[in-house]
Structure formats: structure tokens, C-alpha cells
Amino acid sequence: MVQVAVGPAGVHSDGPETFALLGEVAARHGLRRRTQANEQVDVVVAAQRYGRRPLDLLDEWGWLAPDVTLAHLCGVTPAEIMRVATTGASATHAPGCDLPMGWVVALAAALADAGIPLGLGTSGGGSNDAGHLLADARLALQVAPLVGRAVAAREVLGWATAGSAAGLGRPELGRLEPGSAADLVCWDVTGVADAGVADPLAGLLWAAPGRKPRHVVVAGRVVVRDGHLVARPEREVASGLHALLAARPSRRGTQFPSATGWCRPERLSLMTAPRFVRS
């Protein structure tokens, strides 16, 4: 179930040579490609460095194609949406990253309405501390009406499952039908938070998006049973991660680009600190 892809960070970080070389690697080994596009920093740097829009550059460099997935796509115009749609590229909506970073809300519904295969992602720990897909699906529901039409919970769950599978080029994933991989997640929807919820699937997002799954099956193998990891105790995994992170050299003082300039890691942690809040 492990899948390898090539993915330059974006035109704000990597130049045409890097995109070309990684494109050659992908073609040689039959790998999919992914990159980021149109975060605010991407738009600003592309204008300053090339005098162009990010999607203009990606198209020129051969990175608007059916084997490419574009993450974020904040700040796109209607013409750019249609441009992505005509190339067959897919997109990934990541509101749990975009909002804390101060980027605009992506036009997710408009992307989907244009026929672009749309998945849902969380991004990495540098901009989304929780990485909780259900919580970010709820966020996608909440922010969609700010920039377009409202979306239903089942539609957003479709982005998180079949839509994301399409972005991976894996039609056997994200569905429960004959021939699909035996990937199952089971939640208990009989709790107090679910009382009065007419649609249990919608309740996963609206009623209690932070809930843990009861059972998880991956490719027919049970990996979580009754809320507990099967292969290793969770405390053992957590201890190993703490030890790994403690052994890393400190990166304090290093500066990283942000939407408004350069910021230090401690600034990033302040921006994402609300993700740690638990009730």
C-alpha cells in the first residue's frame, strides 16, 4: 500500500531545472507527480522572480497534466480553474493548513464543479499540527460558504475518500465496492454527541469530528481494534517518536518563508498553536 511520487515544493521554492529533473524521474519509473500551487507565498514569489503566475509557470514546465496533483490552489481565478480542468490535473484542498498560515480560502466547490478531481489533505506538521482529516473535513464545510456555495458533509467525505484516491491514481481506493481494496474505518455513532443526528455520516463532521475510530482495516488487515493499535502499543509508538524528535538538532533561529515574508519556527508554532487546544 506504499506509493512513491515525486513532488517539488512549488515554484516559490524550486526552479525549472528541478521540475524538469523530477519530471524525468517520474516518467522513467512510472510515478505520479505532485506539487503545491497558488499559496500566497507562491503567487508573490512567482511574480517577483518570474513576473508570472504560478500556473503559467507549471504549464510551461510541463506540470499541468493528468498525472499531476496540485495542492492548495488558493487565490485562483475562474480562468485558472478552467485551465486546470482542461489539463486533467487533480487538486487537493487543505484548509487546515491554508487558514493557520493566513492564506485565502481555496475555491474548493468551484474546483469540484469544474470537474477537477478534488481530494482533501491535511498538509504536514509545519503548518497543521493535528493532521486530523475529519477535523479538516469539518473545517472545509465551515469555510466553503465564505467563498462560494455551501457543501454537504457527504460531498466533503467524498473528497476525502474517492477524490483523494483519484489524485493518487488509485481507482481501487476510496470506495466500498467489488474489486476495491478492503480499507474500512468504523466509528461509534451511538454516543451523546450523536443524539438527534439524522444523518450519521454528516454527524461524523458536525457532531464530534475529533472522535477516534473504533476499528480500522487496511488492505484487509486490522490495524486498529476497539480503539487500540493492534501491532504495537500506542504508548510505545509515542515514546519512540519523542525520542526521535529529542535526538534531532535544534532548528531554532532558522528562518522560513511565510505568506508575508520570513518567519522563525517559533513564529510558525504560534500560528498553529490553536490546533493543540482540546476541550
Image (tube, helix red, strand yellow):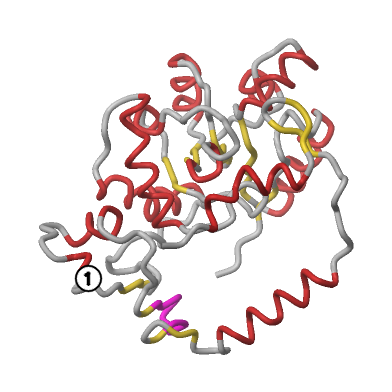
**Residue at image coords 54%, 58%:** 276
- Residue under pointer 1: 189
Where does the image place residue 60, in percent across and percent down from the top left? 69, 21
Residue 213 in the image: above or below residue 109: below
Which quadrant holds the C terminus?
Answer: bottom left
Where does the image place residue 170, in percent across and percent down from the top left? 47, 57
Answer left or right for 122 relative to 115: right
Which quadrant holds the N terminus?
Answer: bottom right
Residue 101 in the image: above or below residue 210: above
Answer left or right for 207 relative to 195: right
Give yes or no for residue 222 being in the magenta stretch. yes
Answer left or right for 238 relative to 77: right
Comparing 250 with 67, the one in front is: 250
State the SS at label 1: loop
Identified by mark 1, the residue type is Val
**Residue at image coords 23%, 58%:** 203
Residue 144 in the image: above or below residue 195: above
Give yes or no for residue 64 being in the magenta stretch. no
Magenta residues span 216-224
Comparing 68 with 242, the one in front is: 242
Comparing 97 with 2, the one in front is: 97
Residue 25 in the image: above or below residue 16: below
Answer left or right for 42 relative to 102: right
Where does the image place residue 73, in percent across and percent down from the top left? 53, 30
Check disc 1: other Cα within 10 Å, few if <14, some if 14-19, many if 20+: some
The mark total stands at 1
Q: Main secondary structure of the magenta part?
A: strand
**Residue at image coords 40%, 30%:** 111
Outermost residue toward the top?
Answer: 51
